[in-house]
Each structure stands twice: as C-alpha cells, then as structure tokens.
Image: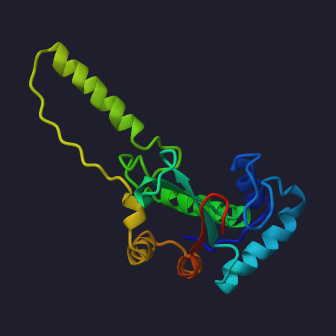
Amino acid sequence: MDPVIITPDDVAEAVRRAPNWKSPRLDVLHDGLVVCHAVLTRQFQEALDQKSLPSLFPTGITHLVPKDRDSIDPSKYLPITCLPIIYKTLTSILSARITRHLNSNQVMSRAQNGCRCGGRGSKEPLLIDAVIGKVVKHNRRNLSAAWIDYKKTFDSVPHTWLKRVFELYKVNCTVRDFLEQCMGQWSTILCHLGSG
C-alpha cells in the first residue's frame, strides 16, 4: 500500500459520507466541520506520522439503553457507543484508503459481502436462501441446510488478529502502527440514564 498523505479532499469526502444532525460527542463538534477541513487535514496527518492521538479521540461514551421497561438485569441493556466525530472522520479516511488498496489489488473475495464496502451484509445471503427455499418447495425436493449465528463476532476478534490481517493485506506500515497505537488507547465511559 502506498504511503497515506491526507488531503483536504479526503476530509471533505469523509465528512460528506457522515450522517448529518447527530448529537455531538466528547469533542462537542457537530458533523459539519466545513471551516475546519484544512486544519483537520494537517492535524490528521501529524497524528498519523507521529502514530499517536490525544486520549479524547479514541474514547467513546457507551449509553446503556434498557431493552425492557424498568429492567435491573444487566443482560437486558443494549450498549450503544458514541465515538467523537473527529475520530470517526479520521478512521473513515483511513478506511477509504485501505479499501482502495484492497480493491485495486483484488485482495477480498466478492463473497466477503459483510466486510465489503457497499455490501449488504447478511441481506443478500438471506435473499438467496429465500429463493432456494421457494425453488425446493415448488419442485418438492428435500433440502438440508445449516446456519451459523455469528452474533457479536466482531466484538470478540482479538487485536492481535487485526494487526496480523493488516500485515497479510500489506497495509502501509505507518497506518498499521498508527491503528495499533489507537487500539491500545480505546476506552469508553459508561452512562446509564444520563449518569457518567
């Protein structure tokens, strides 16, 4: 992968792809940021070159939203984590560059739909399953099938494996080192019913 030089166009594209009118996170910034593109470009490039971030960037706020009314069982809460917009913008830029590298070198199989940019995750396999089911039923045939539930699979991927995948896919070493540093800084603040 070629070295990553972040440009104002990269920042503008990452901001354009971000959903509008979300509430601000720890960085207290909304998604617009238009007047900040040149400054962000310089700061993002410095962070990438120095392989470090302020601790605010990779810190999320995890809100525990009850699935049921008046639940006291911790398993009945859905954790929703909000990350700072600045961090999401930077990782969006790096993700776009890595995706470009993977696509230009045909690294990922077309079957890797859940991880592919623009892929619809499990929707396409479910549609295929539905069509196969209708054909089998219409033709009065037997069908044996098995599904594996990968619920929460990405929550359990060890960081060492992510680092190894970056090496295998020949992601630029500066980007790899930067992301490894970020992973070491990942943290969250738990909030329940507005408490911090």
Q: Position of residue 89 (x, y in %)?
A: 70, 61
Residue in the image at 23% along x and 24% along y: 133
Q: Position of residue 6 (x, y in %)?
A: 73, 68
In the shown orientation, is residue 190 left or right of residue 73? right
Residue in the image at 31% along x and 31% along y: 128
Which colour assignment does the render follow? rainbow
* Pick the front one: 33 or 153: 153
Q: Quick one: which residue is furthest to the top in this view?
A: 138
Residue in the image at 52% along x and 51% along y: 66
Count of all numbered marks drawn on residues in the image: 0
State the quadrant of the C terminus.
bottom right
Check the image and report above or below for 23 versus 179. Answer: above
- The quarter of the picture where residue 141 lies is top left
* Pick the front one: 166 or 123: 123
Q: Quick one: which residue is furthest to the left in this view?
A: 142
Q: Position of residue 131 (x, y in %)?
A: 29, 24
The reply to whether residue 107 is in sight is: no
In the shown orientation, is residue 147 left or right of residue 153? left
The reply to whether residue 50 is in sight is: yes
Residue in the image at 51% along x and 45% along y: 69
Check the image and report above or below for 17 versus 192. Answer: above
Q: Quick one: which residue is furthest to the right in this view?
A: 35
* Pick the front one: 142 or 176: 142
- The quarter of the picture where residue 129 lies is top left
In the shown orientation, is residue 128 left or right of residue 28? left
Q: Position of residue 140 (x, y in %)?
A: 11, 16
State the quadrant of the N terminus.
bottom right
